[in-house]
Every structure is written in C-alpha cells, then in structure tokens.
Amino acid sequence: MKRLIILLFLIGFQNINAQIHEIGGFLGGSNFIGDVGATTYIKPKDFAFGMLYKWNRSPRHAWRASYTQSKITAQDAVSQLPSREKRNFSFENNIKELSAGLEFNFFDFNLHDFEYKFTPYVYTGLSYLRYESLYYQNGEIYPKANKTSGAIAIPMVIGIKSKFLNSWVIGLEAGVRYSFSDNLDGSNPNNLGTTIRPFGNPNSNDWYVFSGLTLTYTFGEKPCYCKE
C-alpha cells in the first residue's frame, strides 16, 4: 500500500512538472441569433476581441479561461423572414463575457515536442456575460437608464490549431453560446410595467457566436528525468 501511494505521488509530481501554459488573444467577429434579425448561426459581422489562458494538463486536454467582448447587432430588414422584414426592428448591444472550462484535443498535441503539430479541438464550460438592458417602445429601442444585466451561458466551441515557431500556437475557431437570457435583443424586458410588451418566442433564449483566430504563446519547462 505504501509503495502504491509513493508511485501515485511520483506520477502526480511528474504530471505537474509536465504542464505547460499558454497565454494570448482572440480576434474575430460576432453574430446574434434571437427574436430580431437573421437566424444564420455562424455569420460574423461585428468585431470581437479578447484574451485567453490555457493550462495544458496533458497532450489531449487543457483547462481554459477567457475574456471576450463585442458589440452585437441585428436588423429585421436582412432576416429573410417576411414577418420580421415587415416589423423592421433593429438593436445594438454590448457583451462582456468571462468563460472557463475544458478544451479537448482530438490528436496528441504535445507542446514539448519540436515536431509540427496540429489538431482539431472542442471546448465547453460555463460563461458569465454582462449586457445592456434594452426594451422597445413604439417600435424604437431604448436602454434602461444606468442598467446592465448578467446571465449564464453555455459555450460550444469547435476549432483547429497548430504549433509553429516552437513557442506559438495559432487556432481558428467558431463558438456558439446558448445564453440563459431572452433579452439580449430587448424582446423580453422585465419590470417595465404594462405599457412595454414582450415579443418573439418566449420559450427560446438568445444565442450569440464568436468566430475568429486565437494566438497564444507557450511557456513552462519540460520535465527532466535525467540524473544530475
């Protein structure tokens, strides 16, 4: 039993030393899917940017944390749905998102290896977003005075990444976020009295998408098993 405990400790210690870190940024675009505008899932149209950190626990998975922000906009006039085109609503909001979760690599992605590496990957976890509280009145969109709201979202990201110049990793990804809010577009405001009425589908929450490039710098020492 004592030998087993020592063996598990040594394996854990080696894994800790084998961990490598990544830090970098994200540049791309965003789009919105909800009760206003088009319903195309991946169609980046507004500038998005952010920063991210990864803690690679193994060549196959990493813990990931990120901050991303973007303006999101939508216009009924380009929705290609006759009812929305006739309604002709539009809105603009700002999203600030913190996200944390697990990234899984389909192929071995050992960053200590000097050979060329690439892999498809998926990422999911939990996100928290802040956004402006909006509402419509007489066909016009208004923000609540000095009011922002928060919500939880579930990110579902797929991408492909490659290591280059030994210490850099570049990736291309698209990430759909299902939010637990139905008011990113102002369609379902709360506590505004009887003069403001919600519209759209009350059983379907809003989605938003971040698509673009990631660039990270890797650091962390490779474990050494040689005798001194």
Image (cartoon, rainbow, N blue to C red):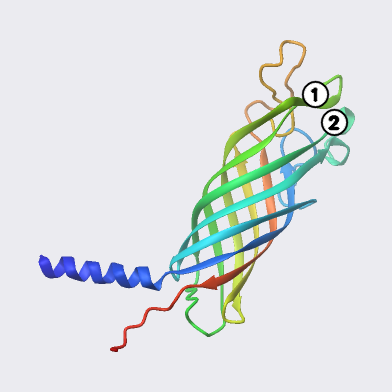
Q: Amino acid at mark 2?
A: Phe
Alpha-carbon distance for marks 1 and 2?
A: 9 Å
Residue 203: percent from left, percent from top: 62, 28
Which corner quadrant of the image does residue 213 belong to? bottom right
Q: How many marks?
A: 2
User: Looking at the picture, does residue 143 appear above or below residue 152?
Assistant: above
x then y, percent, for residue 127: 56, 44
**Image x and y of residue 222, in percent:** 42, 78
Q: Which residue is mark 2?
A: 89
Seen in the picture, residue 185 relative to 196 is either above or below; the reply is below
Disc ID at residue 108: none
> Which residue appears at 68% of the width and 44% of the height?
208
Q: Residue at x 59, y 55 (%)?
A: 157
In terms of secondary structure, where does tag 2 sit? loop
Task: Tell me if I can see residue 76 in this picture.
Answer: yes
Number of residues whose C-alpha sits closer than 10 Å to that of mark 2, classed few (under 14), some (14–19) or many (20 or more)? some
Q: Position of residue 87 (x, y in %)?
A: 86, 28
Instruction: Give the residue drawn at x 74%, y 23%.
Output: 199
Q: Is residue 117 above or below residue 205?
A: below
- Dot placed on the residue nearer the N-terminal end, 1 or 2: 2
Q: Determine the residue located farthest toward the top in the rendered image.
A: 194
Q: Where the N terminus falls, by quadrant?
A: bottom left
In the picture, residue 206 is in which quadrant?
Answer: top right
**Image quadrant where one finds the C terminus:** bottom left
Indicate whether 17 appears above or below 184.
Answer: below
User: Which one is nearer the viewer's eye here, 211 or 87?
Assistant: 211
- Identify residue for label 1: 136
Marks 1 and 2 in Cβ contact (< 8 Å): yes
| Residue type (three-letter) at the residue carrying disc 1 | Tyr
Horizontally, residue 82 falls left or right of residue 23, namely right
Residue 181 visible at all:
no
